[in-house]
Structure formats: structure tokens, C-alpha cells
Image (cartoon, coloured by chain):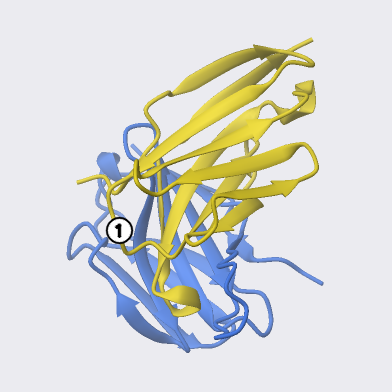
Chain colours: A yellow, B blue
Amino acid sequence: DQQVKQNSPSLSVQEGRISILNCDYTNSMFDYFLWYKKYPAEGPTFLISISSIKDKNEDGRFTVFLNKSAKHLSLHIVPSQPGDSAVYFCAGNYGGSQGNLIFGKGTKLSVKP
Amino acid sequence: DAGVIQSPRHEVTEMGQEVTLRCKPISGHNSLFWYRQTMMRGLELLIYFNNNVPIDDSGMPEDRFSAKMPNASFSTLKIQPSEPRDSAVYFCASRLRDTVIRTGELFFGEGSRLTVL
């Protein structure tokens, strides 16, 4: 029973174009959502988050959009750079800072020069 | 400031052997998480602790798995006996349990890659 789903295992994008990574969730109790980025042989690192009461959060080239009615969120990277090539994990948090994070399976992004 | 430290980075063992993975969280963090990453299941939460107390261990796959946190600066994940299907990368993560800061950011270690032959 997957509470967080990333249905695209991989995505390939040309450098300079937009990358859009999608995530769906089923748990209405998630109070915020996070995106993590993972390079090979390293641990995931935090990228950007959004509260469940917001619909957009922007940080430089990265923007996360949340559509609560559709239980869907997306990460936009504009413009994409080769250094963005990594696995991106979407996660839902419930229980505030005392709770835990449930991760999706990840999407591998490849940005081609 | 040191991040989350895991050891060993790589472990190769034979089926039936005991495996112990270790984690030192970031100083001052009072929540600690163990995750397992596989191709099939992605990042699975195994167990997490708040203030050294296990809160949710429903993700621990079997009784062969056990986790302890004897103090705020150390945790272990033990598999006994190990099986080939336990082969995965095991991540430890920590965060500050704070009622004000709500971003929920976890800080991950670099992982322990386990191979059970």
C-alpha cells in the first residue's frame, strides 16, 4: 500500500529546458511534502518543501506545486542543468516534527548537455 | 559540523551471519530514522526513534531485524540471521524534533551497502 507514488521511474531532459517530476499521494493526513535529491553512493539531501496549506513554493530554479484536491504535487526545475542529474524522491510527512516521512520510489532525472 | 555518520559503508557477508549497522546522528538531533533502499521498493522506513524511544517499528520486515538506541548519540540496526534478500542500502537519518520548526528536514548519512551472499 503505497502512500506516495512516483509513477515515472526515469525522465530525460535537454539542458536548459524544464524538468517536471510528478508525485501522487493517498494519505490526506500529510501536513507537508518534501523533495530530496540523491546522487549515487551518497545519502539523499533535502531540496525543497511545501506545507499542505500552500499551493506553491519557489527556491531559485526549483518550484514545487501542490494540488490538494488531486492529491498531486510536482517539482519544476528551470532551467535544467547536467548537475541536476540524480534520483529525486518525493516524501510526505505526517505528525509534524514528531512524525515520520514516507518516501516514493524515486524518479531518475538525466539532463543531457 | 559533522553530519550523520554510518558504519560500515560496505558489508559483504554470508547468509546466516549476523550483521550490525551503526549510526551516529547529528549532535542535538533527537529523532533518528532507519530506512532501507532497494530498486523494487525505493526508500522504506524501517523504524524511528524520538528521544531514544522507538515510536514506530511497523516497517521492520521480520523478527530477524532489531534496532536499538541506547543513547542520544548512537543507534544500531541488527539483522540476525541475514538472508540474501536483505541485500540493500541502509540509511540512517536524524532531525531535530521541534514543535516550531516544521519543515521536517531529515539529514541522511551516506548509507551502508549490505550484500548477503
Quarter of the image with the N terminus of chain B is: bottom right
Q: Label 1: how many residues lie within 10 Å, few (<14), some (14-19) or many (20+)?
A: few
Q: Position of residue B61 (x, y in %)?
A: 22, 57
Image: B68 above or below B104: below
Image: B73 above or below A111: below
- Left or right: where A111 falls relative to A70: right
Residue at 58 percent of width and 64 percent of height = B106
- The image quarter containing residue A41 is top right
Q: Position of residue B114 (x, y in %)?
A: 44, 46
Residue at 47 percent of width and 60 percent of height = A52
Image: B95 above or below A17: below
Residue at 47 percent of width and 32 percent of height = A22
- State whether residue B67 appears in this view: yes
- Left or right: where B95 falls relative to A85: left
- The image quarter containing residue B3 is bottom right
Quarter of the image with the C terminus of chain B is: top left
Residue type at tag 1? Ser
Which element is circle 1 on? loop
Q: Position of residue B105 (x, y in %)?
A: 60, 64
- The image quarter containing residue A17 is top right
Nearer-the-camera pick, A44 or B88: A44
User: Which residue in the structure is indicated by mark 1?
Assistant: A28
- State whether residue B115 appears in this view: no
To which chain does the residue with label 1 belong?
A
Nearer-the-camera pick, A78 or A55: A55
Q: How many marks?
A: 1
Q: Position of residue B53 (x, y in %)?
A: 38, 87
Nearer-the-camera pick, B27 or B63: B27
- Left or right: where A71 falls relative to A2: right
